[in-house]
Image: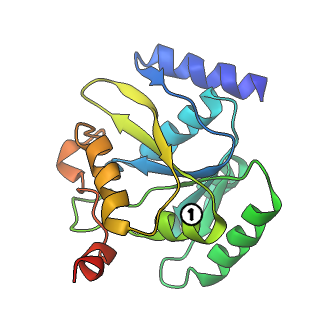
Amino acid sequence: MIVRRALARGIVRAARWRLVGTVPDAGIMVGAPHTSAWDFVAMLLIAWGNGKSPQVLVKHTWFKGPTGWALRKTGGIPLDRENPGATIRALLAEAKGHESFMLVIAPEGTRGSGEFWKPGFYRIAQQTGLPISLGFVDGPTRTLGMGPMFHPTGDVVADMDLVRAFYADKQGIRPANRTEPRLREERAAAD
């Protein structure tokens, strides 16, 4: 782990980016704005730079050939978005058995901005009792890091207001692909 930490910090410095904040010992780490395929690397650099070895949910189609091997070796977990149930159940069971369980989830796509974030990070945090930590990539300031951590209260609108306030000035690597932090569940809560 010492080697990974030094490697991550060295890569961040060599790329002329800054690493800020501290990764908690356990939780659900949101990786946002997720505007580039490079965000996977950015989240690993944040975690490794803080001495953590997270698991990262990645679309299952990336796990073919040498890319799949590399993803698995760096904590990648294939997720079939059409049938995520078995993967999520296994992760929930693992989370309950480990004090240092860290899962990175990117709640938005990279191909372009969308209307909503995917709610998996919020649901998994509620089901496990783990806190949500807000990781970020901000291209204009060349900053990678961690922001606040919170436990979901069940008031999805209030919780997402906190998330929106934090990410308001974070642009990602490709700002045009950024999706405003919003969950479909907020509509139901407002009705």
Specify how the rendered protein is coloured: rainbow
Residue at (51% x, 41% y) in the render: 43
48 on left or right of 137: right
Q: Is residue 51 above or below residue 150?
A: above
Viewer-closest of 144 and 129:
129
Q: Secondary structure at mark 1?
A: helix
Q: Pick whichever, 11 or 32, lies toward us.
A: 32
Left or right: 147, with 93 as reference point:
left
Q: Residue at x 64, y 33 (%)?
A: 48
**Quadrant of residue 77 within the rendered picture:** bottom right
Q: Of the residues shown, which amino acid type is indicated by label 1?
A: Ala
Whether residue 11 appears in this view of the structure is yes
* Residue sitting farthest toward the right: 97
Q: Position of residue 176 (x, y in %)?
A: 17, 48
* Near-viewer residue (64 or 172): 172
**Residue 190: image x %, image y %?**
23, 77
Residue identified by numbered label 1: 125
Picture residue at 52% right of the left edge, 69% below the top: 61
* Residue 108 figure quarter: bottom left
Q: Quadrant of the C terminus?
A: bottom left
Residue 21 image point, x, y percent: 50, 27
186 or 12, which is in the foreground?
Answer: 186
